[in-house]
Image: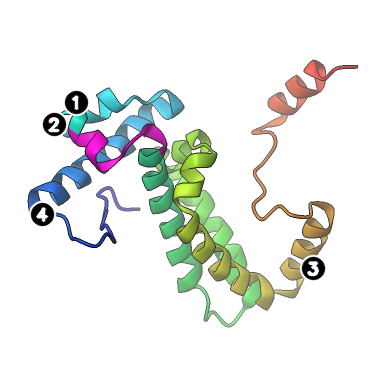
């Protein structure tokens, strides 16, 4: 897991060198703040840690969702790179299992990655839609090659039509029990 961000922009005009450096400082600061505070992260804290003004942060990212979206985009890019690196592995099941293990290890070892997945909202995920589609394609290739995974994926989609991404409903048993107790009877 890298600790510095590659935040290349695909706009019509490339960023000036100082603007690119500021953007990288902002994204690296955001990773650190999100790792520490999760969804309570604030733009002011990111600006302070990056050593730039709040206006500079807003110039690069119009709102918190856009900044979180950039972090999601980076996380999804890392998962996509992992899936692609395993695409040619001879044992399809092991390739898929290694992708899942690698993603879990990254989450376990990298608080910024883990907290980004937890704190990002729908708008942040929409910001990373292009990268998400690339991940679905790369992971789909691994799934199609591994028959047991392919069968499980088909069963899942039959149960949940129209859902392209499935987020866990409960983080652990305590959450499941709390939701069960809070449910109307």
Is 60 drawn above or below residue 79 in the view shown?
above
Sequence order check: which comes first, mark 4 or mark 3? 4
Q: CA distance from mark 4 to mark 3?
A: 49 Å
Q: Quadrant of residue 25?
A: top left
Indicate which disc residue 48 carries: 1
Gap between marks 1 and 4, in whole Å?
22 Å
* Residue at numbered disc 2: 51
In the image, taking residue 49 as reference, residue 172 lies left or right, namely right
Magenta stretch encompasses residue 61? yes
Of callouts 1 and 3, the N-terminal one:
1
C-alpha distance separating marks 1 and 3: 49 Å
Q: Is residue 57 visible?
A: yes
Residue carrying label 3? 151
Residue indicated by mark 4:
16
Separation of residues labelled 1 and 2 (CA atoms): 5 Å
Which residues fall within the magenta stretch?
Answer: 56-65
- SS for tag 3? helix
In the rendering, at what x and y percent does residue 34 appear? 37, 32
At x 66% / y 78%, what residue is drawn?
A: 145
The local secondary structure at tag 4 comes to loop
Residue 76: percent from left, percent from top: 46, 55
User: What residue lies at 55% left-to-right and 64% top-to-bottom?
Assistant: 98
Closer mark to the observer between disc 4 and disc 3? 4
């Amino acid at each position: 897991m890298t600790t510095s961000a590659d935040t290349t922009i695909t706009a019509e005009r490339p960023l000036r060198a100082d603007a690119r450096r500021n953007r990288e400082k902002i994204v690296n600061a955001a990773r650190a703040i999100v790792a520490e505070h999760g969804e309570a992260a604030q733009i002011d804290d990111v600006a302070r840690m990056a050593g730039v003004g709040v206006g500079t942060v807003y110039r690069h990212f119009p709102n918190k969702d856009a900044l979180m979206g950039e972090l999601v985009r980076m996380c999804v890019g890392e998962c996509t790179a992992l899936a692609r690196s395993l695409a040619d592995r001879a044992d399809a099941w092991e390739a898929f299992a290694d992708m899942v293990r690698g993603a879990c290890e990254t989450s376990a070892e990298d608080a910024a990655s883990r907290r980004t997945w937890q704190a990002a909202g729908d708008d942040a995920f929409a910001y990373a839609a292009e990268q998400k589609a690339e991940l679905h394609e790369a992971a789909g290739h691994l799934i199609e090659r591994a028959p047991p995974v392919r069968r499980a994926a088909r069963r899942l989609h039959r149960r949940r039509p129209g859902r392209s991404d499935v987020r866990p409903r409960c983080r652990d048993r305590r959450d499941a029990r709390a939701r069960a107790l809070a449910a109307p009877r």
